[in-house]
């Protein structure tokens, strides 16, 4: 089993619809979910349907894994001050190949790529731009500062 760090860069979105008929704006943010760990971007206020976040989140990852270890889920939400936040849409990024390639190479990066955002009605709700990088941190490498304590038992002498 190889351990590593999965970095998810949430860049921006475009073409997000407004859902609330009472206002003419949306205040979108993104919930990034990987293996049950959830992170949240800041709320992009006043940028309408084309928000920018440029925020990076790091998760522990392992390879090989199973089903849910290979999917990053991103949910785009609209923050509302006076009511509960609305779900705009979501996208799923499949990272099995990226983890496998990163394991072979030491690291592997998928540059920012656009993914379709799909609403709860299965309709197109714009696009989100995300980059993903996997960096191996355990086994025969030397740079193990992120996951310490394994070196003695797996020394490469
Ligand atoms: C392979 O690893 C090197 C060094 O870790 C990295 O610079 C390079 O971007 C990796 N290749 C790919 C395709 O990501
Ligand atoms: C990814 O982005 C880097 C820097 O912007 C660029 O040099 C590289 O060619 C890109 N790789 C791919 C596969 O598009």
Image: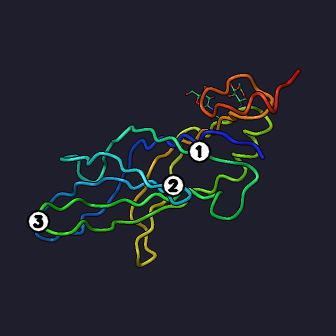
Q: Considering the image in quadrants, where does the C terminus appear?
A: top right
Which residue: 66% across, 39% down? Answer: 4
Question: Label 2 vs label 3: CA separation?
Answer: 30 Å
Which mark, residue 60?
1
Residue 114 in the image: state x and y as whole percent. 50, 49
Q: Secondary structure at mark 3?
A: loop
Badge 1 crowding class, 10 Å Cα cut-off, few under 14, some 14 to 19, many 20 or more, is: some
The residue pinned by badge 3 equals 82
Whole-percent x, y for residue 108 in the image? 68, 36
- Pointer 2: what residue? 115
Q: Residue at x 60, y 58 (%)?
A: 71
Please tell me which residue lies in front, 15 or 119: 119
Tag 2 or tag 1, which sits nearer the N-term?
A: 1
- From this view, report whether residue 81 is shown above or below residue 119: above
Looking at the rendered structure, the secondary structure element under dot 1 is: strand
Mark 3 CB lies closer than 8 A to ligand 2: no
Q: Is residue 44 above or below residue 120?
A: above
Q: Could you say where residue 22 lies in the image, as x and y percent from the top left? A: 10, 69
Q: What residue is rendered at 72% in x and 39% in y?
A: 102
Place of residue 14 in the rendered image (x, y in percent of width and height, measured from the top left): 36, 51
66 or 8: which is nearer to us? 66
């Amino acid at each position: 089993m190889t351990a590593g760090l999965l970095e998810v860069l949430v860049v921006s979105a475009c073409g997000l619809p407004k859902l609330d008929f009472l206002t003419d704006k949306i205040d979108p943010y993104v919930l990034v979910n990987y293996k049950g760990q959830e992170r949240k971007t800041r709320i992009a206020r006043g940028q309408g349907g084309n928000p920018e976040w440029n925020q990076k989140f790091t998760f522990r990852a392992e390879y090989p894994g199973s089903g849910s270890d290979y999917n990053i889920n991103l949910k785009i939400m609209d923050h509302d001050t006076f009511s509960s936040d609305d779900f705009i849409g979501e996208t799923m990024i499949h990272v099995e190949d990226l983890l496998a390639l990163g394991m072979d190479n030491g690291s592997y990066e998928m540059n920012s790529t656009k993914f379709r955002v799909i609403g709860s009605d299965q309709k197109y709700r714009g696009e989100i731009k995300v980059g993903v990088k996997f960096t191996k941190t355990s086994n025969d490498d030397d740079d193990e500062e992120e996951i310490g304590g394994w070196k003695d038992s797996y020394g490469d002498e």
